[in-house]
């Protein structure tokens, strides 16, 4: 698995090995399966849709006189199912639901409802278009079939401000003047749009295009309620990109064509925070290699930026999303002859490349969709194929803002078990003890302080360096879950020739000094990046002798002169 990182003009090349803690969820089922769209739920779980294949054994003993009856039995036995997958922070699958609809149904797109449910859009092999509305538990609220009498294909659904959805896709030309939806087609294939209300009523359906071959790709709602649509038009040697703006009722406001002689494919359009629009395309160069092209334009169809991102291998961004700071994350695929890997790109607000990452094995892997999460991470859905297999699997990964794979969240019990594995040698040597509340106590006598002392000994420094080299990278891997790393100083209850008050206060100061000596030593031995993270989580405290070590109510003064560590986690919903 290769990881390529671009940071400004610096190129770093590394080999990335998947770890159990990586948030990379591969859902294996029989035969080819794919995830095509993804969204974050209001409960902060992640949901993705796609399709799975189902093949049942046919009763060969039964004879069929009617060939159409046999074909019908085959169709009911072999089919593609709409698939909904929901996963939580720790990578557990909490919903795995398929819907078997006639004629090889495929789920293409997902949009959230105001009640944390789902709109799911798809199509069937015989040209039926389907919208499902599900509740938060994936129970069916309604199912709508729509389209023409000919072959139709859905490419996306988008949720609108009124709570309804807009379906965009392609319809073959109809020559049936009695067709209740479309009297006639415009060309070979036409862009079609269908708008639904929040309760599933079909408000309107319309076709757009030329007398050539037109395909509807994607759409987005503008701030004023109008809708901007992108598509493509093929004729002769031309591969034109179409940009169209329509009103809320579907009436055309303007249309613009961008002419291209080379193969150009639009993939996605998004509305930016400045209310302009960004379109992601792939375009072949003179060598026949796909290159990424980004076009930014305004509501009056003015092109603001038209930029190509040149890459070594054929590359495409199938989906893009904008961060709160104006940066962008894009996902897709990259090909180098015989191998296809998933592609992740991070760009700044000026569309300059910051990071690029390739994920996958020696087979076919790709990401089809991405969504920005509440914590500025991103989640992407796609296809993963194992090196020794020809079958595609459903794939969900979570990404950091530097294009690295994020880590799964973990519960306190998981952290306890991981810490015990991390420090198994130290535990076996009776140097430390780890408790289930994630506190770590030093148990080696060489690591205790002498009476009244707080400066670290040589033995303490050697052990702390070894200890922190294991602990800090481990905690940084789960940094989104780490609230505090507390370094606590402790004392015995003694202080010669002192009153009760003085004894407590002097020991309080001594415990703080022991905490500070340990904390500062660990801090000063780290690199700059780690220090910037530590200032957010590192905390020193002194407990005087309030937590001294006692056995049968008798204080063990030597064991009480110590420092301890405790990891405090953010709450998981």
Image (cartoon, grey):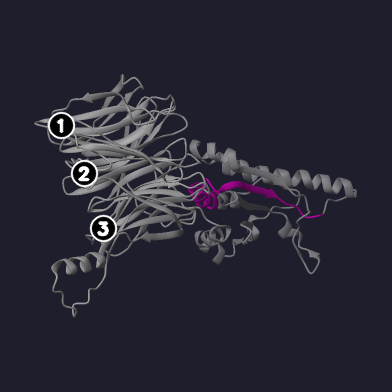
According to the image, label 3 marks what residue? 104
Tags 1 and 3 in contact by the CB under 8 Å rule?
Answer: no
Q: Say which quarter of the image contains residue 541.
A: top right
According to the image, label 1 marks what residue? 211
Disc with the residue nearer the chain's start (1 vs 3): 3
Of discs 1 and 3, which sits in the foreground? 1
- How far apart, in angstroms, are the residues tagged by discs 3 and 2? 29 Å
Q: Which mark is residue 287?
A: none
Measured as percent of width and height from the top left, residue 492 is found at: 77, 55
According to the image, label 2 marks what residue? 335
Magenta stretch bounds: 465-493
Residue 482 lies in the magenta-colored region: yes
Q: How many marks are shown on the rendered structure?
A: 3
Q: Is residue 82 visible?
A: yes
Measured as percent of width and height from the top left, residue 174 is found at: 19, 41
The residue at the point 16 percent across, 49 percent down is 338
The residue tagged with tag 1: helix, strand or loop?
Answer: loop
Disc with the residue nearer the chain's start (3 vs 2): 3
- Dot 2 alpha-carbon crowd within 10 angstroms: few under 14, some 14 to 19, many 20 or more: many
- How far apart, in angstroms, are the residues tagged by discs 1 and 2? 34 Å
Of discs 3 and 2, which sits in the foreground? 3
Of discs 1 and 2, which sits in the foreground? 1
Which residue is farthest left?
A: 236
The residue tagged with tag 3: helix, strand or loop?
Answer: loop
Measured as percent of width and height from the top left, residue 35 is found at: 33, 52
Viewer-closest of 158 and 505: 158
The residue at the point 23 percent across, 61 percent down is 389
């Amino acid at each position: 698995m290769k990881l390529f990182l671009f940071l400004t003009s610096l190129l770093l090349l590394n080999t990335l090995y998947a770890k159990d803690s990586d948030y990379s969820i591969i859902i294996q089922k029989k035969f080819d399966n794919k995830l095509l769209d993804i969204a974050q739920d209001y409960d902060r779980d992640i949901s993705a849709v796609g399709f799975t294949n189902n093949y049942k054994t046919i009763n060969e003993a039964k004879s069929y006189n009617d060939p159409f009856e046999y074909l019908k039995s085959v169709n009911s036995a072999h089919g593609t199912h709409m698939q909904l997958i929901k996963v939580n922070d720790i990578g557990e699958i909490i919903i795995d639901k398929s819907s078997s609809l006639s004629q090889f149904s495929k789920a293409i797109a997902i949009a959230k409802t105001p009640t944390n449910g789902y709109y799911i859009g798809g199509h069937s092999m015989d040209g039926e278009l389907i919208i499902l509305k599900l509740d938060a538990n994936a129970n069916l609220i309604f199912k709508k079939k729509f389209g023409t009498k000919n072959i139709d294909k859905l490419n996306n659904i988008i949720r609108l401000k009124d709570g309804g959805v807009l379906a965009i896709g392609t319809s073959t030309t109809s020559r049936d003047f009695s067709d209740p939806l479309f009297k006639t087609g415009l060309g070979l294939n036409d862009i079609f749009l269908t708008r639904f209300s929040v309760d599933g009523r079909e408000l309107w359906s319309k076709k757009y295009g030329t007398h050539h071959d037109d395909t509807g790709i994607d759409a987005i709602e503008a701030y004023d309620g109008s809708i901007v649509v992108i598509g493509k038009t093929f004729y002769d040697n031309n591969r034109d990109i179409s940009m169209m703006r329509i009103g809320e009722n579907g009436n055309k406001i303007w249309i613009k064509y961008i002419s291209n002689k080379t193969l150009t494919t639009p993939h996605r359009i998004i509305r930016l925070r400045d209310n302009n629009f960004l379109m992601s395309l792939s375009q072949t160069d003179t060598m026949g290699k796909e290159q990424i092209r980004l076009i930014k334009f305004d509501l009056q169809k003015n092109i603001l930026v038209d930029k190509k991102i040149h890459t070594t291998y054929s590359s495409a961004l199938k989906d893009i999303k904008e961060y709160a700071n104006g940066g962008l994350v894009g996902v897709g695929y990259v090909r180098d002859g015989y191998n296809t890997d998933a592609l992740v790109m991070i760009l700044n607000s000026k569309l300059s490349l910051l990071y690029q990452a390739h994920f996958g094995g020696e087979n076919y892997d790709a990401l089809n969709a991405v969504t920005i999460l509440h914590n500025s991470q991103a989640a992407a859905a796609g296809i993963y194929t194992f090196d020794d297999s020809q079958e595609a699997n459903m794939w969900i990964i979570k990404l950091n803002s530097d294009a690295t794979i994020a880590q799964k969240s973990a519960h306190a019990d998981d952290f306890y078990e991981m810490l015990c594995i991390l420090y198994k040698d130290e535990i076996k040597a009776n140097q430390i003890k780890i408790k289930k509340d994630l506190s770590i106590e030093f148990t080696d006598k060489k690591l205790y302080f002498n009476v009244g002392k707080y400066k670290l000994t040589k033995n303490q420094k050697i052990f702390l360096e070894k200890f922190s080299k294991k602990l800090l990278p481990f905690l940084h891997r789960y940094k989104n879950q780490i609230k505090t790393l507390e370094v606590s100083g402790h004392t015995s209850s003694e202080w010669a020739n002192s009153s009760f008050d003085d004894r407590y206060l002097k020991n309080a100061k001594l415990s703080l000094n022991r905490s500070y000596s340990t904390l500062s030593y660990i801090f000063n031995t780290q690199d700059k990046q780690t220090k910037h993270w530590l200032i957010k989580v590192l905390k020193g405290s002194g407990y005087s002798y309030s937590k001294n070590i006692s056995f049968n109510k008798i204080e063990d003064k030597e064991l009480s002169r110590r420092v301890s560590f405790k990891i405090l986690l953010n709450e998981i919903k």
